Image: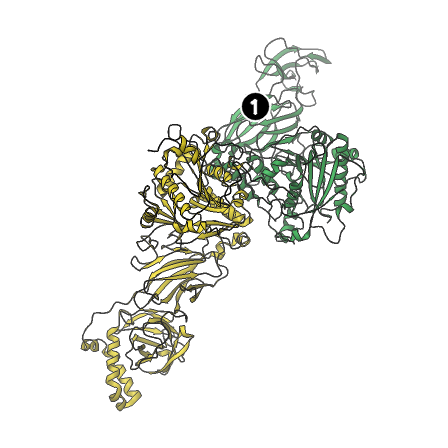
Amino acid sequence: MASGESTASGGSRGWTPYLSVVAAARNDDHGGNLLTRMQAFAHAWIALARRHDLDSELILVEWNPPEDRARLIEAMRWPADTGPCRVRIIDVPPEVHARYRHAAELPLYQMIAKNVGIRRARGEFILAANIDIVFSDELVRFLASRSLEPGRMYRIDRHDVMSDVPVSAPLDEQLAYCRTHIIRQCTREGMYRLTAEGFREKEAEDITAPHSGIYFGSGWHVVERYGSREPFRWIGDEAEIEARVPAGGAIMTLDLEPGPGLGPLPERLEVLDESGAEVAQWSIRERTTVVLAVPPAPAGGVRRIRLRVPNGGRPVPYDARILNFRFFRCDWVEKQSITPPCSKREIVRRHQPQLVRLIGALRRNRGAAGLLLSGPGLFARAVRLLARRGEDIFDGGTDVQAGPGWYGLEEAGGERFRWVSKDAQLAIRVTGARSAMALLVEPGPGVGDGRFVLVVRRLNGGGDVIARVPVNGLTYAEFWVPVPPGTITTISLSPGEHMPPTGADPRILSFRVFACGEGVGARRVHAGAAPGAAAGWPALTIGSEPAEIDWAAALEPSRREVDEMGKPEYLHINGCGDFTLMAREHWFNVRGYPELDIYSMHLDSLLCYAAHHAGAREEMLREPMRIYHIEHGKGWTPEKHAELFASLERRGIPSVSMEDLVWLIARMRHLHAPVLFNGAEDWGLAGYDLPETGLAQARSVVAPAE
Amino acid sequence: MLDDAAAPYISVVVPARNDDHGGKMLGRMQAFLDAWFEQAERYGLRTEIVVVEWNPPPERPRLRECLKWPAGPRVCELRFLEVPSEVHRRFRNSRAIPLHQMIAKNAGIRRARGEFVLATNLDTICSAELVRFFAARQLERRTMYRIDRHDVASSFPPGVTADETLAFCQTHVLRIFTRDGAIEFAPDGLRVVERRDIVPPAAGIRLGRGWYHLESLDDAPYRWIAAAAEVIFEKPASTCRLAIDLETGPSTGGQPLAVEIADAGGRVVAGETIEGRCTLRLYFPGALRQGRFYLRTPRGGVPLTRDPRWLNLRVFGLRWEPIPEDSPAYPRHDVSIGLDFPESGLVELTVDQRSGPPLEDVSVTARDAAGNVVFDTATGGGPGALEPGDAVNVPSGLHLTGSAAAGKPGRGGPRWLLEVVQAAPARDWNACLQAPSPAARHMADPAYIHMHACGDFTLLAREDWFALRGYPEFPIWPMHLDALFCFAAHHSGIREVVLEEPMRLYHIQHLSGAGWTPEGEEARLARIEAKGVRQMPWVELVQWIDLMRRFSGPVIFGTEDWGLANETLAETPV
């Protein structure tokens, strides 16, 4: 019964295109090269609309045209026939502009200008864009498929391309130029330059080594250092790692800690492969180092690994992002460097005490006959294992990462070893054809009588025991690892039983290991499943320490507020002025962009959040759909940004600060309502009868363009 | 399309449910209806009352079954709109808050037919002058009408005529909600002096309008003032001056502040420019024993970030002080009369000034031969200060001397004097909670809107309510949401007009905890806390106000479907 707001304004309502594209400009060479960029924009849109037979209108709002320059319609070249696209140019005369308080300082009220077009648009859907945007063929094909839906706000990543777009070249040539001249990408998480392969470039000081071949894709926020000793990156609910995995697979180590986005700890972090299958997970309570055995990509090349936080997503009041985990490191495990090769005699000389004990133990256990029978072979294998040892006790040149349960490396009496109390874990990639592992192990005081059974379990296979090796004195132990060669596996080594600590060392010293690496073996194991199959990837938690920040305590004062926000969306507002597409009714519901008499910074972002909270849920248009933005001199840089705000302050022009924006987003999340700034139904200068020029009319009166 | 003649000029929107909210609810609502019906008829005001019956309790009758109204044709229509429980339950907090007042008002506003719409509550009564003003059809568009709320005692006589009701209201005012806050009245009809107030009790200094609530700093009480604050005084003795201990506030923007004293008629009688903490000594004209004056700050008014008020002056105390003999601001001219009367008895002495600057506050002192003062007209049972033309009887046989304060030459009439004693330099307010807004100079039109009790009286043209999409519809405790609306109205270019006396809005006092009363505030907060319901914190309201001032624009939270536009509400016209 109650009347809705009037949504009709201006123009004939007879013709209803599917889509209206609205952009605002004045011929003042803002940003430099303005006419060329605008020419590329109009040319490409009209040509693509024709190619895909997209029933559309292109509305250019010419705001406060400079007296001494040609009008846009005159200054640009137009095709003789614009096909299914109508071109409308709407004038906002200087007298109207002069009504605004900062008219002398701000020549173009961009948001109000766009509203002028949106208010007069006739399309079922309205796309607010800018005059230097070129759409990809796939994007316009999608638009022409008429599958847009109400209840959505369509957004897209922006690709910035070099400015020499061949304006007069045919469409495909223009698009090819854009595809091959990309400078950077404007994503939800920020602006990134792209590598030749299309990865987001890493920063100079990043959480991975410069040549690791690991790249941080969507979901990774920029590198920060604030309040921390070392650089880190936040992730929200999902983040993609793009990695060139070394041949045969490799072990990735991740160093991370929980953030404010998580509920009660510990919280799960899952790893998904390209097919979306969960391949590993960890439970994280504090700052933790984990390792993940990454199999090579099925087709070689690049692996796309997704990290997922299933139960995160809680907001913070002072940052619009969702901050579930922050990562301090994401890298490949460093292989132990191989000690320089030396003669067998030299090895024997260096490790004489251990080898003597090995022989002694063998004689005790097996008698003189046993020693004669198997002694030479075992001796040779022990020497080989010691010869392969890197700086630690592990094989050099092999991917191995010690997990929990190992004491640090010790050196005493010229011997190098690590003590173990129980359950020493390690991740290892057995590359040899025989899938065998070997250890040089000696019982310690923790096992009392100097003999025990070493129990070997395979952790990523459900913890099943793969070997029981009797150890009595210094022993060379070799056992089969039932995985195909090249696979990474995690195993644990345990004494069958152990005694309480004795003597001066309070540690439980069950046994010590002098060397650990690949064995020689004698038989092949059965061929298992292909590497990286659905069985899951080996993953381990290596160690943890208290986190730098106790978020639960830090957020306690705002706990209730945060709880009331639920799990809100972190919208893609970077470059949203270049592409925001919604059904017409949504634009009218939020009354277009905020028409505040202030500098336009962040007003487009406020519109996105308002529209979202008024029921237009964000939907991202994905590759290969793209928009290209033609680079110009007025691009954003931090220096220019600071200078701009100083200048606005000097001139007395208010603007929405980053702090304001974040506060307003938090309020919308908290109140579950949009925040709108247009307090009247005459938004978009609805009360004005603005002069409008169609292309056909214009051409007859306009002299040929330059 | 409605017939213009039949269309109501004003729609009065009240939300309600029959749950005896606040106690004696039906009685108060009946008084509200009776007053509207009777006065609308009397002044020919075409009105509709839109009662939005929200989430009616199933076990109780509907309101229309409990209330009465005159039969037959009337100029005042009555409509009952019902928002059923199913709709109510869709909102968050529906269990803890049985009536979402703001959404209910919006539902009524959205369906109102009047040219103008008054959002109010069921326990208000308009004074005759107010209804007469409505009936004059002088209301303007793009204007938000506000008014002080007069709270009257709840010992309300039932079943009386509107005139009797109004007479009761007029004589039983407990407090007034003004732009500056609530003013409580003492039995003598003046504002009460609170415990540890900035004026001593029973000292003949009373505060009138323009004083913000009592605050304290390190245990020292103070009150802020903005542009003008009223003082009502009664001098205890002739040779007294009023000492006003104060300091310039953050709304001076760090500039020296002009302070004026205006007399009861509003005429500026003294002024000084001050900065920092100082004591003003105000000397009254000799003849003025009692009256009122205004402490005014014509400039100032710089908006602050964390306080929506203008804090021009902080007043720590007002007190009487004797005027010392040597007060430079009050020079006395001693005149030796030099007559000795040898006879005993009384001599009549007439003060008769022939020349020179006009004298005031004349005193006559008689001394004996040894020079001791044995009589003084200014003290000890004497008649007080004299003025030219006065006569006094003095004992004879003594030496008489005269003394008089002289005004500035050439300036006639009663004379006020203001003296400034500097105590401390200005403080840097930028480092304080009350810091001035750094964006103050960019603000196009900051205002401190009369938001007190605005839920009881906010009147705008229907189209203006629509432009603003009504009140914010947050399903929380509705505190401050009405104020948020008023500020949004202002920042969308709607002019605020506060209707002045004798136009009044009376509000019948109800149980504390239901609406806002100073004494009930703590209990109310405890109650809503216990329900686990949130209200918009004051700090947040202030942040919204600061944002609107900085952006010179309103904030609106409603979408096109505000006021339950998509619901069909059952309507019972009666």
Does A415 sit above or below residue A687? Answer: below
* Callout 1 secondary element: strand
Image quarter of residue A332: bottom left
The picture places residue A238, in percent across and down from the top left corner, at 44, 58
B110 sits to left or right of A425: right
Q: Amino acid at mark 1?
A: Leu
The residue that mark 1 highlights is B418
The quadrant of the image that shows the C terminus of chain A is top left
B64 sits to left or right of B531: right
Q: From this viewpoint, which residue is outermost toward the bottom? A: A369
The picture places residue A432, in percent across and down from the top left corner, at 28, 75
Q: Which chain is green?
A: B
Pick the residue in front: B249 or B553. B553
Pick the residue in front: A201 or A81. A81
Image quarter of residue A640: top left
Image quarter of residue B124: top right
The picture places residue A319, in percent across and down from the top left corner, at 46, 50
Chain of the residue under the numbered disc 1 shown in the image: B
Pick the residue in front: A396 or B346. A396
Q: Colour of chain A?
A: yellow
User: From where the camera sits, is residue A21 visible?
Assistant: no
Does A323 sit above or below residue B298? Answer: below
The picture places residue A334, in percent across and down from the top left corner, at 30, 65
